[in-house]
Image: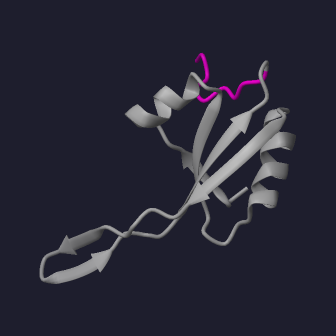
Amino acid sequence: MDEIKYPVLTEKTIRLLEKNQYTFDVSQKSTKTEIKQWIERFFNVKIIAMNSHIPPRKKKRIGPIIGHSIRYKRMIVTLQSGYSIPLFSNK
């Protein structure tokens, strides 16, 4: 699925893993219900809550040209206790 870009791993999101909350960057056009259905089917988990926000743009400069980074939406997914999402494979 192209709508979920990748999981976000920062200091804050690693702290949220203790509360069974996972963070993903997704396409800006996708909705909460689409992402919820896809995550529940793909990872076989139950989702309690979902929060989303669009982070502010960051400027990027390449020589004399100033542009902006690609826009995305960040989703914080709270799972039911007893469920988890494997972010890394054991290989």
Using the rendered view, name the quadrant where residue 89 is placed.
Answer: top right
Residue under the point 79% across and 18% down = 82
Q: In this view, does 74 lie to the left or right of 34?
A: left
Rendered position, 15 above or below 38: above
Rendered position, 62 above or below 39: below
Residue under the point 77% across and 22% down = 81
Using the rendered view, name the quadrant where residue 26 is placed.
Answer: bottom right
Rendered position, 55 above or below 63: above
| Range of magenta residues | 83-91
What colour scheme does the image use?
one colour
Using the rendered view, name the quadrant where residue 69 is placed.
Answer: bottom left
Q: Is residue 90 left or right of residue 64?
A: right
- Residue 6 placement (x, y as % from top left): 56, 47
- Residue 86 placement (x, y as % from top left): 66, 26
Residue under the point 79% across and 50% down = 36
| Most foreground residue, 52 or 91 | 52
Image quadrant for the C terminus?
A: top right
Image quadrant for the N terminus?
A: bottom right
By secondary structure, the bulk of the magenta-drawn segment is best described as loop
Residue lying farthest to the bottom in this orientation = 65
- Residue 20 placement (x, y as % from top left): 65, 27
Q: Would you say residue 41 sits in the magenta stretch?
A: no
Q: How many labels does the image show?
A: 0
